[in-house]
Amino acid sequence: HTPMYFFVSVLSFLEVWYTASTIPKMLSNLLSQRKTISFPGCLVQIYFFHSLGATECYLLTAMAYDRYLAICHPLRYPSIMTTQLCVKLAASCWICGLLGPIAEIILVSKLPYCGPNKIEHIFCDFPPLLSLACTDTSVNVLVDFVINACKILATFFLILLSYLWIIRAILRIRTAAGRRKAFSTCAAHLTVVVIFYGSILFMYVRLTKSYSLDYDRALAVVYSIVTPFLNPIIYSLRNKEIKVALKRRFMSMTREVE
């Protein structure tokens, strides 16, 4: 019932759908000899993957703003970060994220594809799909670059700016224990940001279709599978309250079994 846990719960809900947009189809393809997906199905997968990924960018930015207020303005924090503001921030993240990739989807759906329509990737995405088009895709690449640069770089810059102010505030704390306590409240979020943005920056903020198939696949595994897998572990192991709650829950379940 605090803003930080509200945003963590929204992030958890988001990543259930974020992974569901690619992993089930990916697993079915791994288990079947004939790996197919329809063109409309491919576009739907790209839309939800990118819209939910954009929502995560905005949500991580909102979480960075929450940590900035908590550490830099602790006395005003309860009056600023109210439940209404948390709901508005979360709703804005979802709305902006869901509207984000519509222009890219429309452009890529109008491209001619001459075949063989074999996607050299672990799921449908813009770069491998553009490589199948039998026409000039420079406009699509440029539009993708502009949208992704604005979306990814802008949110990353806001997160970076928030942490610069946070670090400045932490360094002003006189005691080492106080500095450790202040930094521990944002360590989990910072770890998630580094892993997530470290991969998507190299994948989507570029003016070329692709670096190499192996390079793109490796990055795709990081931001589509590894990051969602690590997030709950990071937030659980880095948070004392969650560890205590899990321990209490486990002990109560043990008593019920006995």
Image (spheres, grey):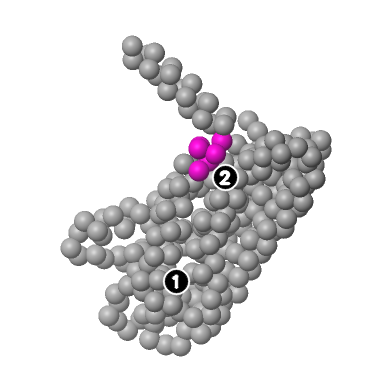
Give me the residue at 77% from left, 51% from top: 168
| Callout in the foreground (1, 2) | 2
Q: Is residue 160 magenta?
A: no
Residue 86 visible, this angle? no
CA gap, disc 1 and disc 2: 30 Å
- Compared to 47, does 13 lie above or below? above
What secondary structure is the stretch in magenta mostly built from? helix
The answer to which image quadrant residue 187 occupies is: top right
Residue placed under numbered mark 1 in the picture = 126
Magenta stretch?
A: 234-239
- Compared to 242, does 45 lie above or below? below
> Which residue sits furthest left?
33
| Secondary structure of the residue carrying numbered label 1 | helix
Q: Quadrant of the C terminus?
A: top left
Residue placed under numbered mark 2 in the picture = 188
Q: Nearer the viewer, residue 28 or 177?
A: 177
Q: Position of residue 157 (x, y in %)?
A: 68, 62
Which is nearer the N-term, disc 1 or disc 2? 1
- Compared to 82, does 151 lie above or below? below
What is the three-letter code of the residue carrying label 2? Answer: Ala
The reply, left or right, for residue 185 in relation to residue 33 is right
The answer to which image quadrant residue 98 occupies is: bottom right
Q: Which mark is residue 173?
A: none
Give me the residue at 47% from left, 62% from top: 47
Q: Position of residue 181 (x, y in %)?
A: 67, 37
Q: Is residue 237 magenta?
A: yes
Q: How many marks?
A: 2
Q: Position of residue 202 (x, y in %)?
A: 51, 69
Categorize mark 1 by other alpha carbons within 10 Å: few (<14), some (14-19), many (20+): many
